[in-house]
Image: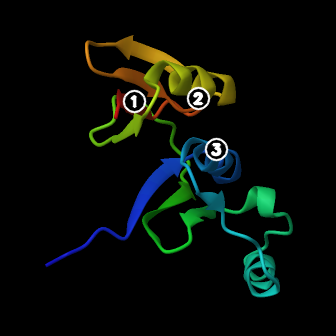
Amino acid sequence: MATLKDVVFDCRHPASLARFWATVMDGYDVAPYDDEELARLRAIGVDDPEDDPSVLVEAPGVAPRLFFNRVPEPKTVKNRVHLDLRAADREAEVARLIAAGASEVGRYEHWVTLADPEGNEFCVFPE
């Protein structure tokens, strides 16, 4: 039986999208860059973590983790898979996420669809 390990986002700029999603998800943070990780980046020609082609967002002991991987092509169509989030105060959370860089895509009876800064859709439901 399989279990969920990671949710992976293909994107143009992993560092900035990872920061956005670390803001979205309660308890999640961009994984720290220790000496070993910085050495790994230098070995592949990356001197600044802002240019990291694969950035991890995680919460200690919580699954799934979120990975952001650089790809050359832009997003061109609607997501085939998206995240559904829940919040105690849906409208306050929607306002917070828009202030963090999301955009509103649509409103429905039970949820609001937003898009992250690179256009990936996700939904916010009340608890």
Residue 92: x, y in percent? 55, 22
Residue flagged by tag 2: what amino acid is it? Leu
- Tag 1 near tag 2, CB within 8 Å: yes
* Separation of marks 1 and 3 at Cα, in angstroms: 14 Å
Question: Which residue is identified by label 2?
Answer: 97
Residue 94: x, y in percent? 52, 23
Quadrant in the picture for the N terminus:
bottom left
Question: Which residue is identified by label 3?
Answer: 23
Compared with 96, 17 (above or below) is: below
Name the residue located 38 percent from the left edge and 20 percent from the top edge: 112
Residue flagged by tag 1: what amino acid is it? Val
Residue 24: x, y in percent? 57, 41
Quadrant in the picture for the C terminus:
top left
Q: Quadrant of residue 41?
A: bottom right
Circle 2 — which element?
A: helix
Outermost residue, left direction? 1
Task: Looking at the picture, tell me which residue is in the foreground, 117 or 60.
Answer: 60
Residue 79: x, y in percent? 33, 36
Question: Which residue is identified by label 1?
Answer: 124
